[in-house]
Image (spheres, rainbow, N blue to C red):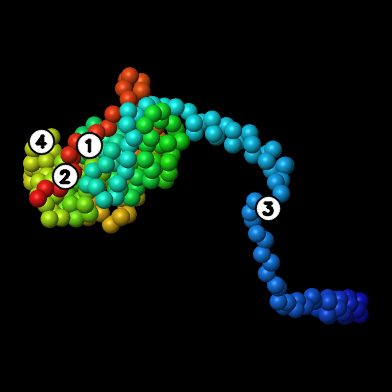
């Protein structure tokens, strides 16, 4: 009898709880737009919070690490540019630290995001030049793929390179030379670039199927900073020139 009463009580409680179930009724919500502009009052609490961090960051970004003897301009229309040559030279130097057998380097005009002004070179200017988190990658290419890459460089009106020269005629690579010599069809060559391009970015031809790929953890931006600091330590300035590494002939 006691068991029956207990069971009956449990049923009543369960039924009562079921009857207390909350019901949600959908309601149309009207969106509200808040304009964020100079008319909004400053929040002094937030400003006090982030100001020390901003001051520390500004101090680091404005730190001088080198000197450029000329304004390193960039160009999408010219076959060669001062900023492009500087970037490619620095990229090759980075690669040689990872693999001393690295001979060539490749970047793209679109990857160079700013120019370097004549005068003091700061940490911030290198961040502006390469604001992305790209890392250095070394690709071992066959002579055939290197020729395909050279044709891509020619077809696109020139790209930043170092370690080799390309002469362009009618949007084709009319001549490719490494250390003044024609490429050897029986050997391979190690090209320094960065992961974005090696992964297919900018649709570069000739580098998508390398004989070997070596990825590194070195960010290109950090490598640029170290490159400039190395020049300064050696008592040198950035003295990049247009040297005809990519040229258009008629």
**Closer to viewer: mark 2 or mark 3:** 3
Spatial separation of the CA atoms under disc 4 and disc 1: 17 Å
The residue carrying pointer 2 sits among few (fewer than 14), some (14 to 19) or many (20 or more) residues within 10 Å by Cα, namely: some
Check the image and report above or below for 188 versus 63.
Answer: below
Locate residue 65, reporting x and y percent: 41, 27
Is residue 205 visible to us here? Answer: yes
Q: Residue at x 89, y 77 (%)?
A: 9
Q: Secondary structure at mark 1?
A: loop
**Closer to viewer: mark 4 or mark 1:** 1
Spatial separation of the CA atoms under disc 2 and disc 4: 15 Å
| Residue 39, disc | 3
Q: Are marks 4 and 1 in contact (CB under 8 Å)?
A: no
Check the image and report above or below for 158 versus 73.
Answer: below
| Residue carrying label 2 | 247
Q: Secondary structure at mark 2?
A: strand
Q: Earlier in the sequence, mark 1 or mark 2?
A: 1
Locate residue 91, reporting x and y percent: 30, 37
Spatial separation of the CA atoms under disc 2 and disc 3: 53 Å
Q: Residue at x 22, y 54 (%)?
A: 156
| Residue carrying label 1 | 242
Q: Nearer the viewer, residue 30 or 141?
A: 30
Q: Residue at x 8, y 37 (%)?
A: 181
For residue 94, which quarter of the picture? top left
Spatial separation of the CA atoms under disc 1 and disc 2: 10 Å
Q: Earlier in the sequence, mark 2 or mark 3?
A: 3
Q: Secondary structure at mark 4?
A: loop
| Residue carrying label 4 | 180
Q: Residue at x 13, y 34 (%)?
A: 179
Q: Earlier in the sequence, mark 1 or mark 3?
A: 3
**Closer to viewer: mark 3 or mark 4:** 3
């Amino acid at each position: 009898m006691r068991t029956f009463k207990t069971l009956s009580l449990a049923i009543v409680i369960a039924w009562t709880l079921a009857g207390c179930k909350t019901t949600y009724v959908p309601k149309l919500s009207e969106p509200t737009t808040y304009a964020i502009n100079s008319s909004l009052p400053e929040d002094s609490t937030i400003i006090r919070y982030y100001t020390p961090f901003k001051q520390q960051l500004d101090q680091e970004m404005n730190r001088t690490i080198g000197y450029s003897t000329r304004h390193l301009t960039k160009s999408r229309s010219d076959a060669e540019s001062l900023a492009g040559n500087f970037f490619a030279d620095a990229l090759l130097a980075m690669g040689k630290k990872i693999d001393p057998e690295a001979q060539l380097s490749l970047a793209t005009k679109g990857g160079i995001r700013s120019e370097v002004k004549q005068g003091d070179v700061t940490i911030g200017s290198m961040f502006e030049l390469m604001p992305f988190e790209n890392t250095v990658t070394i690709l071992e290419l066959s002579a055939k793929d290197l020729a395909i890459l050279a044709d891509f460089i020619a077809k696109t009106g020139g790209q930043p390179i170092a370690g080799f020269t390309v002469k362009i005629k009618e949007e084709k690579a009319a001549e490719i030379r490494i250390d003044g010599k024609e490429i050897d069809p029986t050997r391979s060559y190690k090209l320094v670039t960065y992961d974005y391009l090696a992964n297919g970015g900018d649709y570069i031809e000739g580098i998508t199927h390398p004989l070997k790929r070596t990825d590194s953890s070195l960010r290109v931006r950090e490598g640029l900073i170290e490159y400039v600091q190395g020049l300064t330590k050696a008592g040198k300035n950035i003295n990049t020139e247009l040297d005809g590494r990519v040229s258009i002939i008629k």
